[in-house]
Amino acid sequence: DANIQVKLMYAFESAAYIYDGIAHRFWNPRKNDYYVMFFHHIVTVLLISGSYNPGYFPIGAVVMFLHDISDLAVDMLVIVNQAKLEGKEWFFIVEIQYVVTTLNWFFFRNILYYRKILKPVYDAITYCDCFENCMHNYYIFLGLLTALYIMHMYWLYVFLRIGYDILTMEKGKDRGVSYETKET
């Protein structure tokens, strides 16, 4: 039954983001983007759980899909970076994964996110008077979706800055350190 599958997907994703938020707050080391990441977990949980109750499944489902598909590349980058699979001897695995991750992030979190979520919700508020009795819900969703989009742009900047730093770094320096934000 598709309804059960959607409920299970929502339950799993909500639980995963709640756990990530708790782990981020209490167990993970504090890095440069600590507060942005913590706010990201809160906003994502609010969007997923908030879209479930009133039945705004398209919003929650697209948020979950775009996050999950782009998180795969980020997680893979972290793995190959920590394994130090970089340079000519490792066929530039880290470098290639960095490019794949940055392009993936740009496409899914900056282009598709805007086109498939942010713009349609904005258009629904602006052009449709059929939501008069629940308009406040759409304004809340629009605010949360916009906050998430701004964070996605911030992390795209971080990815691009990492690439710039690595390209302009002196030879012999440990490039792997630049792939992850430094602890504060």
Image (cartoon, rainbow, N blue to C red):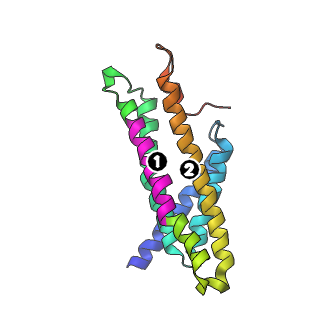
Give the amino acid at mark 2: His
Residue at 46%, 47% (x, y): give it.
105
Instruction: Check if residue 155 falls in the magenta segment.
Output: no
Query: With respect to residue 158, does 112 lie above or below?
Result: below
Q: Residues within 10 Å of mark 2 (few under 14, many from 20)?
A: some
**Residue 160 locus on image (x, y percent):** 51, 36
Q: Is residue 122 left or right of residue 98?
A: right
- As drawn, is 96 to the left or to the right of 114? left
Q: Residue at x 60, y 50 (%)?
A: 151
Residue 165 location (% of width, % of height): 53, 26
- Please give the range of residues in magenta: 97-116
Q: Secondary structure at mark 1?
A: helix
Pointer 2 with pointer 1, Cβ within 8 A: yes
**Quarter of the image where the C terminus is located:** top right
Residue under label 1, please give it.
105
> Mark on residue 152?
2
Tell me the quadrant of the picture where the N terminus can be found.
bottom left
Residue at position x 55%, y 60% in the image? 15
Distance from disc 2 to disc 1, alpha carbons, whole Å, reads: 8 Å
